[in-house]
Image (tube, helix red, strand yellow):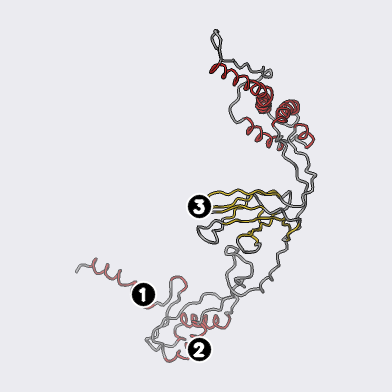
Amino acid sequence: MSAAVVLRSLGILLPFFAAGAACADEADSITALDMDNHESLAALPQQDEAVSHLESCAHERDATACQPVPRLCHRKRSLVHRKRWLALRHSLFTPCPRQEPLMPTWNSGSTWNSGLLWGPASPPTPLVRYQPKPHKQTMKRQEYYPTRLGDQPEWHFNYADRLTENGAAMGLLPADVAASANDSKHLGYALGTWLTKVREFGPGSTAELETLKLGTGGSPFELPEFIPPAPPAGLTPVLPGALGRIFRYVQAIKSAPGYTEELGLLLGIVGGEDTVEHAAPEFSLKTELGDGCHCVKIRFKKFGHYAVAVYSKRGTGGLELLGIDTGSPYEDQRPLLVPGQPEVREYKLRFWDDGVENGNWTEVASATVSL
């Protein structure tokens, strides 16, 4: 065997021999005590210093300042140092007591991502009984857009004129103002003079059709020609959906920096206050076919109150509360008492505010359910 091979073998084996003589993990290890021989620790100053360090650490360590300590190897120990080793073993190999932070219990109000762990903590927060906020009664406003067809043309022309006059003062873009005013003038014209002329033309056209069918005479018959009234000056063509565009632009107007309620009243986009006192809700019934049932849809008006209490009676049973509803409509989807047998259901409503029913009962209304 060549010298190079021998040296290489020794280079590989020497670390293993060194590891057998040492007994620590990585950087925090110290030179092991050679317990196979019976030399005195006094003859090995380095080992004696190591054991003294361990004794000092064992006496000084506590729960608040515990540092990692070197470990003695678990080889056979000399009788000279057996007692010294046994005295150290308990303190050196007993894990340091750790100070865990106080941790909340499941009902202490802490969440999973609050940075705290589960465990004993302060006493749970007492439950607070829910107290509903008092309902603030406000005066409800009526819809600003007229419901009567005869009032709508005047509203459209007023809106267009006032918007053109005050659009710049409210901070609106001129192009948007012109487009909305043009939409409104088209509707004012169509709902006003044009519709009136069409209605006048209708009966005359019907009479001409009777002449065509049963009339007499020697002259050729000609259908009457409808001549529409002249539109307002300056109208430009518009796309369908003019009224929807106006309603959406009204919301933009009310968000403009220069908008005030006085200007809103001038344009006609603020409804008047509803001064009528309503002692009870108003509602209507409609039966509709649903998924496997003949449902009753209850549309109601609560006139500024928070909710309504919906009651019903059917068969020989008494009046029962179906639910508290804050938004119309309410749907009664109960199955029939007797499958396949139609039944009559009676309904009546009351106002509901701050957890208490109030006001007068409505009149009883009924509907027949057959599925």
Q: CA distance from mark 1 to mark 3?
A: 84 Å
Residue 277 placed where, x, y %? 79, 48
Residue 325 vertical position relative to residue 264 in the rendered view, above or below: below
Question: Which label belongs to residue 291?
Answer: 3
Mark 1 lies on residue: 18
What's the amino acid at mark 2?
Answer: Ala
What's the amino acid at mark 1?
Answer: Ala
Q: Are marks 1 and 3 in contact (CB under 8 Å)?
A: no
- 10 Å crowding of disc 2: few (<14), some (14-19), many (20+): few
Residue 143 vertical position relative to residue 166 in the rendered view, above or below: below
- 10 Å crowding of disc 1: few (<14), some (14-19), many (20+): few
Mark 2 lies on residue: 87
**First along the sequence among labels 2 and 3:** 2
Look at 45% across and 86% down and name the residue there.
41
Q: CA distance from mark 1 to mark 2?
A: 28 Å
Q: Are marks 2 and 3 in contact (CB under 8 Å)?
A: no
Residue 78 vertical position relative to residue 154 in the rendered view, above or below: below
On the picture, is 213 further left or further right than 257?
left
Q: Tag 1, which secondary structure?
A: helix
Look at 51% across and 60% down and name the residue there.
339
Q: Quadrant of residue 142?
A: top right
Locate the N terminus and report the quarter of the image it occupies.
bottom left
Q: Tag 2, which secondary structure?
A: helix
Q: Nearer the viewer, mark 1 or mark 3?
A: 3
Q: Nearer the viewer, mark 1 or mark 2?
A: 2
On the picture, is 157 further left or further right than 217?
right
Residue 161 placed where, x, y %? 74, 25
Residue 177 placed where, x, y %? 68, 27
Residues 117 and 182: in front is 182
- 10 Å crowding of disc 3: few (<14), some (14-19), many (20+): few
